[in-house]
Image (spheres, rainbow, N blue to C red):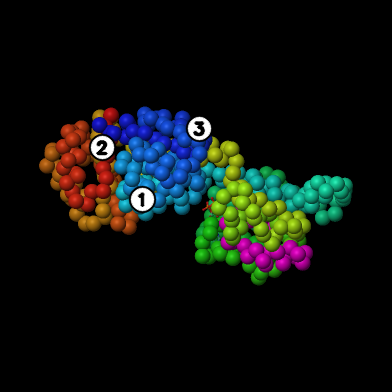
Amino acid sequence: MDHMKHGRIVLLEGIHPSAETRLEKTGMEIVRVDGSLGKGDLESVLHEATMVGIRSRTQLDDELIRKVPNLQAIGCFCIGTNQVDLEAAAGLGIPVFNAPFSNTRSVAELTLAEIVMLMRRIPQRSADMHSGKWRKSAAGSREVRGRTLGIVGYGHIGSQLSILAEAIGMKVIYHDHISKLPLGNAHPARDLEELLSTADVVSLHVPATPATRNMIDAGRLAMMKPEALLINNSRGNVVEIDSLVSALKNGRLGGAAIDVFPEEPRSGDSAFETPLAGLENVLLTPHIGGNTLEAQASIADEVGEKMVRFACEGSTGTAVNLPTVDLPSRGSGQHRILHFHRNVPGVLGSMHSALAGLGVNINAEYLRSQDDLSYVILDVDPADEGAIRSELEKIPETIRMRIIVD
Ligand code: NAI
């Protein structure tokens, strides 16, 4: 019997209901908790959990993970996973899933809107109206049609933005550190410097890495066209904020939209200060580029589906902390053995011998290792499940195993 089928999924922090619809396929009981919980309450709610779904506020540390005896998988219904002790989970053969690309469209749409707003100098016009000033003027206000957008980082978001921007008549150039297929009429700039000196709007969509840290510094800002616009909806450390402030104050740049900051408050409703506050034609947003209701639903679908695939097929595809193993669905009547073990020579050989000793025939096998952990999926002809379990559990390197049967 696959005890996951009779397990319990605990969903915390008001995860979007789409997740529940997906997870029903596992046949497990689903328990919903609306808010996040402190350690004591969390421990008692999770005690019987087979899988848990959290967002960013629930902390799953080493101690807590070890206290949930049947825990088999963790779904982070968000982008980040640093609220979970990934190494501790990996050491117990517990995959952690997230949804890194579910909010791509939301970021691309916001960026497009910001381009139009900054080109029309709307931040100032709107602030004037809020303070009772009717300043009707075309000064500095431009259409975006025909202007050049320079996208730095042509990945999921950058390439989606490329399509949207062309649809409203912009020319698109991009720079990426690896060769990327251009979409539509977009084309790669020779290098970052050429992009900066050609684009009317520069939009950053790179990850936070040592190479992108302060990528846009005083020298690079000086390469931008006079009155060009800068948008950073990627990560806070990509732009040197003090240099940007100078470039905006001295009129070198025409405006900026900034959603991400080198230091951001940990919780909502916190006070926040930035030297960009109060500058003209600057849009500031609190890291909400990807925060839309659609993105929440899409995160629920993506992570929910990954948890279902792990529960029903043993797939760890795109888990952030474990070797990723994906086998097609098993043939009808087949048993599927999922085995996490320490990555040392000879374990697979021991498994083969144990199964051969029981007269069990292997039909499919896929193994991957990462650091000191290995995960193997084996499809075998139907056999005595209890006997397989007790033989394989005798292998000392075994961390955790499960057998899926119909
Ligand atoms: P992605 O991984 O699909 O694309 C990143 C691209 O940047 C890749 O094509 C990569 O080759 C390129 N790149 C990496 N290092 C580079 C370098 N040194 N020079 C030039 N290109 C480089 O990532 P995705 O999903 O498009 O996200 C982009 C950024 O947006 C990430 O930093 C992510 O954290 C951020 N983000 C921000 C959100 C928000 O709410 N503001 C929401 C979602 C993502």
Task: State which region is magenta.
Answer: 229-252
Q: Amino acid at mark 2?
A: Ile
Residue 403 bears which disc, if any? 2
Q: Give the position of the N terminus as an image quadrant.
A: top left
Residue 11 image position (x, y, % from top left):
45, 37
Q: Are marks 1 and 2 in contact (CB under 8 Å)?
A: no
Residue 63 bears which disc, if any? 1
Asked which secondary structure carries label 3, the reply is loop
Q: Is residue 404 left or right of residue 133?
A: left
Q: Amino acid at mark 1?
A: Glu
Disc nearest the viewer among 3 and 1: 1
Q: Give the position of the C terminus as an image quadrant.
A: top left
Q: Amino acid at mark 3?
A: Pro
Residue 371 image position (x, y, % from top left):
32, 57
For label 3, the residue is 17
Question: Could you give the CA–CA distance between mark 3 and mark 1, rounded to whole angstroms?
Answer: 29 Å
